[in-house]
Image (cartoon, coloured by chain):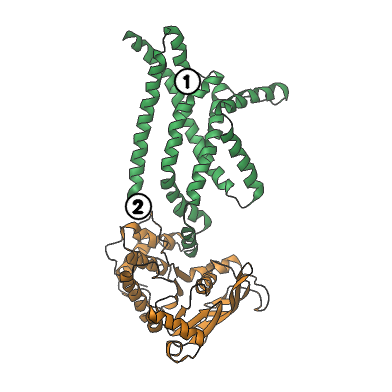
Chain colours: A orange, B green
Amino acid sequence: MDFATDQSVIAKDVSQDKASPILEVKHLKKSFGDLQVLKDISFNLNAGEVLSIIGPSGSGKSTLLRCLTQLETFEAGAVRVDGKDMVVSAPNEPVKYAPSKVLRDIRLSTGLVFQNFNLFPHLTVLQNLTLAPIRVLGENREAARELGLCLLKQMGLEGKEKSYPCELSGGQQQRVSIARALALKPKILFFDEPTSALDPELTGEVLKIIRQLAEDRMTMVIVTHEMAFARDVANQVIFMDQGVVVEQGTPDFVFKQSQNKRLSSFLKRFSET
Amino acid sequence: MSDLSNLLPILWGGFCTTLAIFVLTLLFSIPLGLLVAVLKMSRYRIVRYPVSFYISVMRGTPLLLQIVAIYFGSYYLSEYAGVDFSFERFPAVIVAFSINYAAYFAEIFRGGIQSIPKGQYEAAYMLGLTRGQTFYRIILPQVVKRVVPASANEVITLVKDTSLAQVIAVTELFALAKKQQAAYASIYPLFVAGVFYYVANLLLSMVFAYIERKLNYYK
């Protein structure tokens, strides 16, 4: 791909078979000790679509995301990313993970944007973006640099490539971390409360970037407390409470039509604040 | 003043020995300390426990005693246990200083490594970096910055600790100054030796201040 001429580096090829979802989660269960935090979670996501996950604190949203990105292990269930199975066990038996080579492939096809950015403070913005493409994918320096600069431009951070993360605002840092995840050209991008660590006046610039990615048909799973954003950006919304998917459907259904009591009291609390 | 012109060349000779102990100790104890720090954080008890014991002995007994133990210990081993090996004086000093300072450095490095937020490891993991790449490219550079102030303390202490080498008759700066004290029937040579230590540490402090400033390019 010629990045110099293609403005939208992250535009996804969505010509693949629409019938098979790019992310499949089946009967996923996860406990911390005696506390079961995820009780039988299932959903599918198609390529080029956006899933918002909402729910009260402690409902298991972030844990779910961490299971899907392999930062946590789960005890039962199955996850398939872009046709690759994360586990080799049947859905009803204890999880047996796939060989590490497969897990690594899956990891490289999934990007994660953290709540508190987790940029590498000792590296410049550009080095943050090029480290993995050079060291992990083995791209040559010049190509990695080109892609990095192009991504920065797309994030509205032109001219910041030589800055260090500490010299940037929170919103800028989060945009760098989105660019860093995109530099590996992931198939799915996960967001773990991407604006929760930001000052309110900085959330807008990050949300705008994510909206832009959605328009470019980037497949995304977004855990967020920004309700209006969750509704507008998503094709599909999941409402979680106490480790279960309580309601699931189109934004219109979840935010307007659903009669579910827990959901409506959750949304009511949000509209009051 | 002619006293001083006689004294300085003699003390300078001792200072060179001091400098050699200093440089060699740092050369060996810093990498060894890093290794010990990593081993102390091992997930295996069989690795962790002996390393903890080693650190506690090194920090819990006088360096003076450790020098004696290494030197005479190896002598007795060769004499009575039939082991055909014993240390010369100077190598014994280097070994004792190195394993002693490695223990202190290890604890500084361990603190530094453990102060790096978990998120750095997670970000590296998500980007597909291997464990080795994560350690050398992400963790270690940040650890260096965090351990410089505490390491400066150790390094400056080391300059003064070299005077302990005289316990097995290695003629470093302080040992020679003491000899001259007898010859001059005055403590004046000891003060001149003190000036040597002080100037060396003054230079070291400046070097460390410079390093800290250089590493200040990020927070």
Q: Which residue is the site of mark 1?
A: B172
Using the image, name the chain to which the residue with label 1 belongs.
Answer: B
Res. B63 in view: yes
Q: Earlier in the sequence, mark 2 or mark 1?
A: 1
Q: Position of residue B69 (x, y in %)?
A: 62, 26
Amino acid at dot 1: Glu
Pick the quarter of the image with the N terminus of chain B: top left
Instruction: Residue at 63% x, 67% y: name it.
Output: A33
Query: Percent x, y for residue A45?
Result: 49, 82
Chain where mark 2 sits? B
* 10 Å crowding of disc 1: few (<14), some (14-19), many (20+): many
**SS for dot 2:** loop
Q: State the image quarter where residue B173 is shown.
A: top left
Measuring 58% from the left and 46% from the top, which residue is drawn there? B40
What residue is rendered at 44% in x and 28% in y? B159
Q: Which mark is residue B218?
A: 2
Estimate the x, y position of residue B28 in percent, counting from the top left. 51, 35
Left or right, B26 with respect to A228, comes to: right
Is A144 rendered above or below residue A5?
above
Say whether residue B29 is left or right of residue A229: right
Q: Can residue A146 be seen by looking at this rendering?
A: no
Q: State how far apart marks 2 and 1 are (Cα).
A: 41 Å
Three-letter amino acid code at the position of disc 2? Tyr
